[in-house]
Amino acid sequence: KQEVTQIPAALSVPEGENLVLNCSFTDSAIYNLQWFRQDPGKGLTSLLLIQSSQREQTSGRLNASLDKSSGRSTLYIAASQPGDSATYLCAVRTGANSKLTFGKGITLSVRP
Amino acid sequence: GAVVSQHPSWVICKSGTSVKIECRSLDFQATTMFWYRQFPKQSLMLMATSNEGSKATYEQGVEKDKFLINHASLTLSTLTVTSAHPEDSSFYICSAQGTGTNSPLHFGNGTRLTVT
């Protein structure tokens, strides 16, 4: 059974800092991995999708990496801003038609 | 980008009544939609997978007669919570996937259900 872990559960950093959010999964045979952002009381916004054959994906100040063999992914946020404050969830899919397994998320607070 | 509209964003109902939540993909066709439930500070729990034109597939422990799912078209899926009880109070989120298996999932903004 695939399990996804995100530690720590919460993180507070000053504005401008570069930061890394970690995600680990127990079954390395994944199909793809997706990072999401969730604002309080809202749904999820897809940030980056990494296919199993890819090592990383970039979008603006965000960079997500994938290391399947070690069961890890990281989301790198450059030059963090208060507007980046949200909960970040990673989720993995083990097959093309399988469900997503989510981590519990990391609640990020960027202090002005 | 792809947009998924979920309605209503919040609803308060009395015990014993039924509530319908709609999930629409606005600018793409979604052959598959997913319904999740989220408790405070917890991850999303998949309730069921909805495929257009066929019966939904429910996850273990989810009562299909209580949570009725209909996916009548490629852009609309509905979740009806029947005979709601206070323990059904939660945040319900739908997501939709485009026709390609490598398409990312796009999520609605969720529905906060409170049963009094």
Image (cartoon, rainbow, N blue to C red):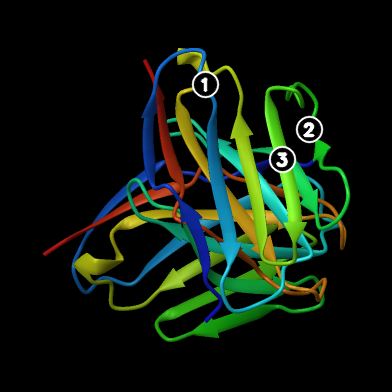
**Relative to the observer, which residue lies in front, A46 or B73?**
B73
Q: Chain of mark 2?
A: B
- Residue A2, x across and y down, in percent: 78, 42
- Side of A86 where B83 appears, left or right: right
Q: How busy is the neighbourhood of tag 2: few (under 14 within 10 Å), some, or many (20 plus)?
A: few
Q: Chain of mark 1?
A: B
Residue B96 appears in the figure: yes
Asked whether the residues under the numbered discs 1 and 3 touch, taking CB atoms below 8 Å apart as contact, a structural biologist would say: no
Residue A64 location, quadrant: bottom right
- Tell which circle, 1 or 2, labels the residue nearer the N-terminal end: 2
- Tell which circle, 1 or 3, labels the residue nearer the N-terminal end: 3
- Cα distance between the residues tagged 1 and 2: 16 Å
Residue B68 location, quadrant: top right
**Relative to the observer, which residue lies in front, B68 or B40?**
B68
Q: Disc 3 residue type? A: Ile
For the point 58% across and 55% down, the residue is B23
Q: How busy is the neighbourhood of tag 3: few (under 14 within 10 Å), some, or many (20 plus)?
A: many
Q: Which residue is mark 3?
A: B69
Q: Disc 1 residue type? A: Asp
Q: Which mark is residue B88?
A: 1
Q: Are marks 1 and 2 on the same chain?
A: yes
For the point 59% across and 50% down, the residue is B94
- Side of A62 where A35 appears, left or right: right
- Residue A81, x across and y down, in percent: 23, 71
Residue A8 appears in the figure: no
Q: Which residue is mark 2?
A: B59
Task: State the quadrant of the N terminus of chain A.
Answer: top right
Mark 1: secondary structure: helix
- Side of B26 where B14 appears, left or right: left
Q: Chain of mark 3?
A: B
Q: Disc 2 residue type? A: Glu
